[in-house]
Amino acid sequence: MLRKGILPGLDERRVDSRTIYVGHRPCPATDAFIPPKFCDNRIVSSKYTVWNFLPKNLFEQFRRIANFYFLIIFLVQVIVDTPTSPVTSGLPLFFVITVTAIKQGYEDWLRHKADNEVNKYLVTVLEDGRRARKESEKIKVGDVVEVVEDETFPCDLILLQSSREDDTCFVTTASLDGESNHKTHYTVPDTEKGLESLSATVECEQPQPDLYKSLGPENLLLKGATLKNTQKIYGVAVYSGMETKMALNYQGKSQKRSVVEKSINAFLLVYLCILVSKALVCTTLKYVWQSQPGQEEPWYNQKTQKEKDANLYLNMFTDFLSFMVLFNFIIPVSMYVTVEMQKFLGSFFISWDKDFFDPEIQEGALVNTSDLNEELGQVEYVFTDKTGTLTQNSMEFIECCIDGFQYKNRDSSTELDGFCVTDGPFRPFCVLEEEELFLRALCLCHTVQVKESTGQEDGVGDRVDGVLDGEMVHPAELRGFIASSPDEVALVKGAMKYGFTFLGMESKNMRVMNREKDVETYELLHVLNFDPVRRRMSVIVRSKCGDIMLFCKGADSSIFPRVRQEEVDRIHMHVERNATDGYRTLCVAYKLLSSEEYAQADAGLREARLALDDREEKLMAVYNQVETGMSLIGATAVEDRLQEEAAETMEALQRAGMKVWVLTGDKMETAKSTCYACRLFQRGTELLELTVRTLEDGGRRREERLHEVLLDYHKRAVSAFSFPPRSWSSAKQDYGFIIDGATLSLVFNSSPDSSHYKSLLLQICQNCTTVLCCRMAPLQKAQIVNMVKNSKGSPITLSIGDGANDVSMILEAHIGIGIKGKEGRQAVRNSDYAIPKLKHLKKLLLGHGHLYYVRIAHLVQYFFYKNLCFILPQFLYQFFCGSSQQPLYDAAYLTMYNICFTSMPILAYSLLEQHICMEVLMSNATLYRDVAKNAMLRWGPFLYWTLLGVYQGLLFFFGVRFLFSNPALQDNGQVFGNWTYGTIVFTVLVFTVTLKLAMDTRHWTWINHFVIWGSLAFYMVFSFFWGGIIWPFLRQQRLYFVFANMLRSVSAWLVIILLILLSLLPEILLLVLRKPRWPRSRQVLHTYTHTHTHTHTHTHTPSSRSVYRFDVQGKNMSCVSDA
């Protein structure tokens, strides 16, 4: 049978469409046939190929200002006659470019590897009626593809045939939108069963990235989705490769820059100004000196005619460039590669941390980007989702309310509740018609699928729950539930507790076993699917006796307007109380349909589902028409438990100085209770509520009331604390702020007062300890994060969530954290870091984040310091050589200073340093505040390091010059030359900067010892060999036996040792006299012990205690647990 125009959701007005021939069978000869051309099914996420890697990577690297600067310096050395060899800058630049290229090439190789795993995956395709296995990348548009259970769809398919009797299949789209619920898809109606002979065409629109238009009970199966609870299906490929919706929706994350990188650029600008100033001063001095009689052209250095005819200004510019080259080492090119290596290697410590391993999912932490490690130590605002992040997203049925009576799950008893208006004697459960009707509604109003247990499927795949609880002993009940959400499984299990068990579906009949063990059968006529706008779902069923019933469940705000008011009054207080207790509430309603009502609804539903235009709007209209005039049966309360150590984690973050904002789509009462349970709201916290309810209290327009409430809250939360308290006894009141999505829309609207409202709102929120935003849409979450991120001071923000609705705020924040939860992996894939549980956030920030920041901040300051020490003597030397551009150091020393002699110790320090023990950082959260707001990279510490470099540079140069004031330095009466002068300065320099780092090291490992003492030994050995052997590839060997002769002089030894001691003397005095930057062990231990004792005095006596042992200067910390 020929089918034309098979298309889910085709817009008839769209001309730009494609025609697909199923199985590549052309139409009869009467139709014109032009073979269509479509892209292949390859997925490409890699950035480079073998052919374009080199030019593309080089282009990207030289777009960085620092790399481009050093390239210019290198070219100047090649073109202009400069005092130093081009090797001195070319080799470090080559090293930096090579290491970065290897790192980026390795990362792209991993992307190629992941692409190949997808593209080479074997799939089954029907070709000429035969099943053939081929690689996924070879699938063509029009191929009929077979997919079996638990396989992912290799491309976008239209469902032609299913193994299920009802011609449906179930899929999960967790990899697309993060939702782990099972969605129902239908085969194209009236399709021939024999696909081998099917001749049909598909008319569909051109590829577009609109993901949600086709998700739902339709015919289109998207690439990346997984087939569930269906043995196998057959579908025709309509979009392939980079034209699939998954590929079109892929967006590379925007490049996030850390605050350390911004500080580096600022410091670099300062040192660039110093470099230019030095070059200008030396150029000026050179021409001032040459202007003196006899100095421009001395007898021993006569100018050639070409030099005499040269332009004076051109010579000055050339000399300026030569001085720039001579002093360019003050800009540390190797710092960039060291920072890159520190970030890349340091990220492995997060992945390797065993404390992040979760035995439940058998996974640990994941680092998606290593560029933000230090940013973890600078977080000021934490934005967290509630469901699945603060809570476990694991539901348990707690209680229900039927006709005003409360039924507890824990003891299965009935009690009269004080909130209800109904009064009467005690009644046993399930003897009234209303109670049985309520339990039948729980067993019928859902999309739960039942699957027989094989004993090996507990907790496998995307099931919300595994094997059922074992209270019921009937063999038919030992089954697994596959549900669209954890709530539905909890409600079906709750009905089981009271004797009504859902046994599953046979064909289109739902089977329920009642308390008397009788099996009741209901024909499922229609499912009115859940919608986030309607916030309810319904089913229409027909009983054996012919009654047609509609059961509906949903949020109270969507059910109450559709039932009688007197029924609402009996249940409303129960719903409010359950929400206040932190439970998730749902209301259940019922309606008996007459034959005429059902016929009208059935016709409307079928017509709307077959509509090609405005299908969703037409379905919504029919839904709203059917779901009216219902009777309210009761309400349910389901508990979503808190995540493990959620309260302790939130409390630690607040002690660390971070402000926690909860952004959720849940009800205000439920979210508020969760905040109290997590200790975000305390008993003494005064809550400022800005919701639709507060705006409607005054009886005026919302906009007028909004401005009035904002001004009132601003006066209380902001203005009251802009002046100092009158007395010492005045304590600051803690405020909590609550806002809902509707009110936030008013604040963010495009009215002229919008910016004023946003300013008031931001000031109020920033003065509150905790902010709760409820009923939030994903876009509103991102707007909140963006508002704080772009506020005054540009605070560092962190967003954490586990679902697809959290992706927007995860991408918007400076740092995005994904939790490997039950709502798919969309948040994990779009995050910068992923952790199994919320409790791991504490160590990630307070431990790893703190240490990463301290390490890299010290690395940056140290690099600028040691290069200033390196170049300052070279600058001072120009005052004593007539500004002739004579280098003080040998070319080998210039080249290897940053690459070999001083690079490894600081790299080891930046990877291994623990100035405070990890356990102490975890136990004393206030230590996080010591490094907050970029404390170690401010201008104050930068000025200190700069002055230290200036002091030591001056001491190096003039100390050695004082030595050279004595002409008899060697036993044979010979004097030292200028290369010996520079070698002594360089030796003092290398030893001083290396020993300075050793003094800063608090956590010594064998690696630190090896690289620090090994670097000094390598310098000595290299200097001996470099000057002790005649190298044939050198035109001139300036250091021939210079180093060996220098060490023969006792005076040289004395000066070297004395200058090293004098250079480090200020640091030694500071260590002895200055108050330490970090608290000493006794202070930390006393604070921790006091807090620990105060917290646990009324709970238990600890069986063990942790003792933190330090040495006298705070080094070599160790953590010992004494029983």
Image (tube, rainbow, N blue to C red):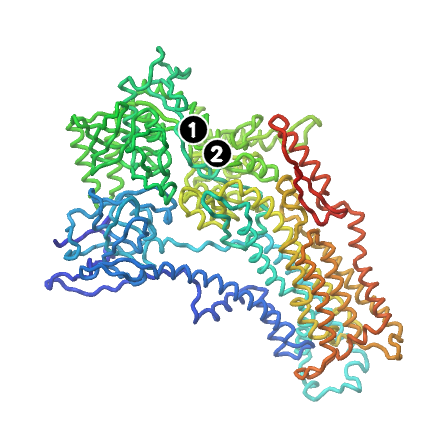
Amino acid, disc 2: Leu
Q: Secondary structure at mark 1?
A: loop
User: Outermost residue toward the top?
Assistant: 425
Q: Is residue 86 left or right of residue 681?
A: right
Q: CA distance from mark 1 to mark 2?
A: 11 Å
Counting from the top left corner in percent of width and height, residue 713 is at: 54, 30
Image quadrant holding the C terminus, namely top right
Q: Who's the residue at 60% across and 59% down the image? A: 339
User: Outermost residue toward the left?
Assistant: 30
Q: Secondary structure at mark 2?
A: strand
**Residue 583: assigned label:** 1
User: Outermost residue toward the bottom?
Assistant: 305
Classify mark 1: residues with Cα within 10 Å, few (<14), some (14-19) or many (20+): many
Counting from the top left corner in percent of width and height, residue 208 is at: 31, 54
**Residue 647: assigned label:** none
Give the vertical position of 573 relative to 224 (above or below): above
Check contact, mark 1 vs mark 2: CB within 8 A: no
Q: Is residue 842 left or right of residue 449?
A: right
Amino acid, disc 1: Tyr
Counting from the top left corner in percent of width and height, residue 491 is at: 35, 30
Classify mark 2: residues with Cα within 10 Å, few (<14), some (14-19) or many (20+): many
Q: Is residue 349 left or right of residue 508?
A: right
Q: Who's the residue at 32% across and 34% down the image? A: 478
Residue 907 or residue 979, whichever sits in front: 907
Mark 1 or mark 2, whichever is nearer to me: 2
Mark sitting earlier along the chain (1/2) = 1
Give the vertical position of 205 relative to 440 (above or below): below
**Residue 642: assigned label:** 2
Rendered image quadrant of residue 247: bottom left
Residue 982 or residue 81, whichever sits in front: 982
Counting from the top left corner in percent of width and height, residue 19 is at: 21, 58
